[in-house]
Image (tube, grey):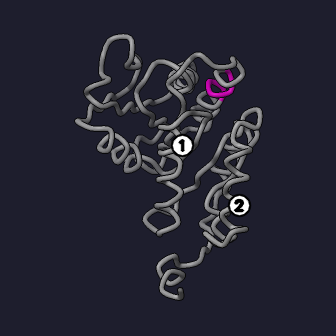
């Protein structure tokens, strides 16, 4: 496997393990499929929840894992112990920026406030042209259905262009995620700055 940014995929996901086991198993399967396809994993460095599950899937297939964790959370029982490389940052902001810079694609597993914030940041970065990478939402058991409805409502109420719904791909399974990433072509989107200047 080539160990460079072009072959790393970032996965955002819950740190909580107090969730339905289907989320855990799908996250683990996602990690396994990433590794089988030659991709390295960049993730938040935690051993619990969907973060840990995805990393375990990569580990089971002897794949490369880069964990990025803030020093406040770099504690025994929290940090994933089998990372190929563990990067410790001073702040959550630095952590997120580092994860983004190491990755050529992004996957949102199910998650809470932190996962939603990470997903919204990369969508916004892509909307503004800072990145052009694929962004996949793994919608296990319809977890993100309400969020997708909210995105549609943003379009309906005129807060964003319908074209920006192409910033990301909603996928039902890990297989759909990897197919999207493997076949991804950069999409032609409206220039957000020009859109703002028109108003």
Residue 26 drawn in magenta: yes
Say which of marks 2 and 1 sits in front: 2
Q: In the displayed structure, would residue 10 be above or below residue 160?
A: above
Tell me the SS state at disc 2: helix
**Mark 1 residue element:** helix
Nearest the viewer among 199 and 167 is 199
Image height of 48 relative to 41, above or below: above
Q: Residue at x 52, y 66 (%)?
A: 127
- Using the numbered discs, state the Cα–Cα distance from disc 2 to disc 1 in whole angstroms: 17 Å
Q: Mark 2 or mark 1, which has the lower sequence index? A: 1
Q: Are marks 2 and 1 in contact (CB under 8 Å)?
A: no
Spot occupied by residue 70 in the image (x, y as percentages of width and height): 30, 31
The region drawn magenta spans 25-29
Q: Is residue 107 left or right of residue 82?
A: right
Q: Residue 174, percent across and down?
A: 70, 36
* Disc 1 crowd, CA 10 A, few/some/many (<14, 14-19, 20+): some
Q: Which secondary structure type mostly characterizes the magenta part of the structure?
A: helix
Coordinates of residue 26 in the picture (x, y in percent) = 68, 27
Residue with the most extreme bottom position: 198
Q: Nearer the viewer, residue 179 or 43?
A: 43
Q: Quadrant of residue 24?
A: top right
Left or right, 110 with reference to 130? right
The residue lying furthest to the front in this view is 157
Per the rendering, the mark at residue 116 is 1
Residue 153 tag number: 2
Decide if residue 143 is on the left or right side of residue 199: right
Name the residue: 73% across, 38% down: 175
In this view, 131 is above or below 24: below
Report the label total. 2
Q: Residue at x 39, y 43 (%)?
A: 99
| Magenta-span inclusion, residue 192 | no
């Amino acid at each position: 496997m080539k160990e460079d940014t072009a072959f790393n995929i970032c996965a955002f996901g819950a740190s909580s393990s107090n969730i339905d086991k289907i989320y855990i198993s799908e996250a683990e399967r996602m990690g396994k499929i990433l590794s089988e396809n030659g991709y390295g994993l960049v993730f938040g460095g935690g051993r619990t929840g969907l973060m840990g599950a995805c990393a375990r899937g990569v580990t089971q297939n002897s794949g490369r894992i880069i964990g990025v964790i803030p020093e406040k959370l770099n504690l025994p029982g929290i940090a994933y112990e089998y990372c190929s490389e563990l990067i410790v940052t001073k702040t959550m902001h630095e952590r997120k920026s580092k994860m983004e810079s190491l990755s050529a694609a992004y996957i949102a597993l199910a998650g809470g406030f932190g996962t939603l914030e990470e997903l919204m940041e990369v969508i916004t970065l892509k909307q503004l042209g800072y990145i052009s990478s694929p962004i996949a939402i793994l919608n296990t058991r319809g977890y993100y259905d309400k969020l997708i409805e909210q995105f549609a409502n943003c379009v309906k109420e005129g807060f964003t262009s319908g074209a920006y719904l192409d910033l990301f791909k909603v996928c039902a399974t890990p297989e759909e995620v990897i197919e999207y990433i493997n076949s991804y072509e950069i999409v032609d989107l409206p220039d957000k700055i020009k859109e703002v200047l028109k108003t």
